[in-house]
Image (spheres, rainbow, N blue to C red):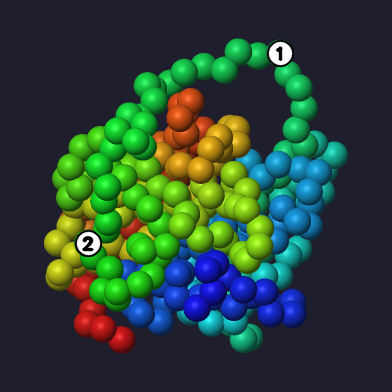
């Protein structure tokens, strides 16, 4: 097993067991593939900043060899949109639309919309209890509970990577955010994970500035409806304050047995 979430293989990427999610031993957590898409896009368009990423998970992402296919959707001088497809064999398993903005210097004063979270060193060590395997995403990440109690539907946690996204390269601020962002619904989970699941069908991350430091703060609340639809709404933070938001549409159901 490599000490990274993905290992390059020609023009493809091979997922390691660090990507393993909680619902199946054969499928990835949503964070690492979202970060891989951003990694490939950022390398292709380095002069622009990625301000928003929306990923639709069309199928469970397998822990296997994957390709990222890019195509421009709109190429403006200031704002661009690109489509990225995560492909397993001949099957598109995830589809992403990325909003890219050319950075500029503008004389404005940033506004403060919420107080910073208690720092990681003052927060309690925590590990998500609903993973079935001994190793996976939950062990590749360090997590600390900053506010609230897990299982109540509202909590905040700090997360940072124990392994890089790809070998021999420190994670970028955006990669750190995206690896962690799909955990918002897990931080604020309030279901009985022994019998229920709340799988997010998509992931939208919007950022106003880059992350500072290694720790990603997720200040999250989840709501669930009898219709079987839920929503996780997460404020993304660093030590200085808010840097963006995460939204995840949740599909509620009975938890299946191991596959």
Task: Report crowding for label 1: few under 14, some 14 to 19, many 20 or more residues within 10 A (C-alpha).
Answer: few
Marks 2 & 1, CB-CB < 8 Å contact: no
* Position of residue 181 in the picture relative to residue 157 (left or right): right
Q: As drawn, which residue projects farthest toward the right?
A: 77
* Residue at horizontal 60 percent and vertical 36 percent from the top: 210
Q: Nearer the viewer, residue 232 or 74?
A: 232
* Distance between mark 2 and mark 1 Cα atoms: 46 Å
* Residue 222 tag number: none
Q: Secondary structure at mark 1?
A: loop
* Position of residue 144 in the picture relative to residue 33 (left or right): left
* Position of residue 157 in the picture relative to residue 77 (left or right): left
Earlier residue among tags 2 and 1:
1
Q: Secondary structure at mark 2?
A: loop
Q: Position of residue 153 (x, y in %)?
A: 21, 45
* Residue at horizontal 30 percent and vertical 74 percent from the top: 134
Q: Position of residue 259 (x, y in %)?
A: 31, 86
* Residue at horizontal 44 percent and vertical 38 percent from the top: 236
* Residue linked to disc 1: 107
Viewer-side label of 2, 1: 2
* Picture quadrant where residue 237 is located: top left
Work out whether 246 lies above or below 240.
below
* Residue at horizontal 77 percent and vertical 37 percent from the top: 102
Task: Report crowding for label 2: few under 14, some 14 to 19, many 20 or more residues within 10 A (C-alpha).
Answer: few
* Residue linked to disc 2: 129
Q: Can residue 186 be seen in the rendering of this structure?
A: yes
Q: Position of residue 132 (x, y in %)?
A: 26, 74
What count of labels does the image hold? 2
């Amino acid at each position: 097993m490599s000490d990274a979430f993905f290992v390059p293989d020609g023009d493809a990427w091979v997922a390691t067991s660090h990507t393993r999610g909680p619902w199946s031993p054969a499928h990835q957590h949503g964070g690492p593939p979202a970060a891989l898409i951003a990694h490939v896009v950022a390398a292709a368009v380095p002069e622009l900043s990625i301000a928003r990423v929306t990923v639709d998970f069309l199928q469970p992402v397998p822990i296997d060899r994957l390709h990222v296919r890019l195509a421009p959707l709109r190429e403006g001088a200031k704002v661009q949109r690109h489509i990225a497809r995560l492909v397993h064999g001949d099957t598109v398993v995830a589809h992403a639309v990325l909003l890219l903005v050319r950075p500029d210097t503008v004389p404005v004063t940033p506004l403060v919309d919420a107080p910073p979270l208690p720092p990681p060193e003052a927060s309690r060590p925590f590990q998500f209890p609903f993973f079935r395997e001994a190793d996976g995403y939950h062990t590749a990440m360090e997590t600390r509970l900053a506010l609230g109690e897990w299982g109540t539907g509202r909590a905040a946690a700090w997360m940072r990577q124990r392994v890089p996204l790809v070998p021999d390269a420190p994670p970028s601020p955006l990669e750190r955010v995206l690896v962690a962002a799909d955990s918002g619904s897990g931080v604020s989970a309030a279901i009985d994970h022994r019998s229920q699941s709340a799988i997010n069908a998509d992931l939208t991350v919007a950022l106003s500035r880059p992350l500072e430091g290694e720790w990603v703060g997720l200040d999250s609340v989840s709501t669930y409806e009898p219709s079987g639809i839920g929503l996780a709404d997460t404020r993304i933070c660093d030590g200085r304050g808010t840097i963006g938001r995460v939204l995840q549409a949740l599909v509620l159901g009975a938890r299946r047995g191991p596959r």
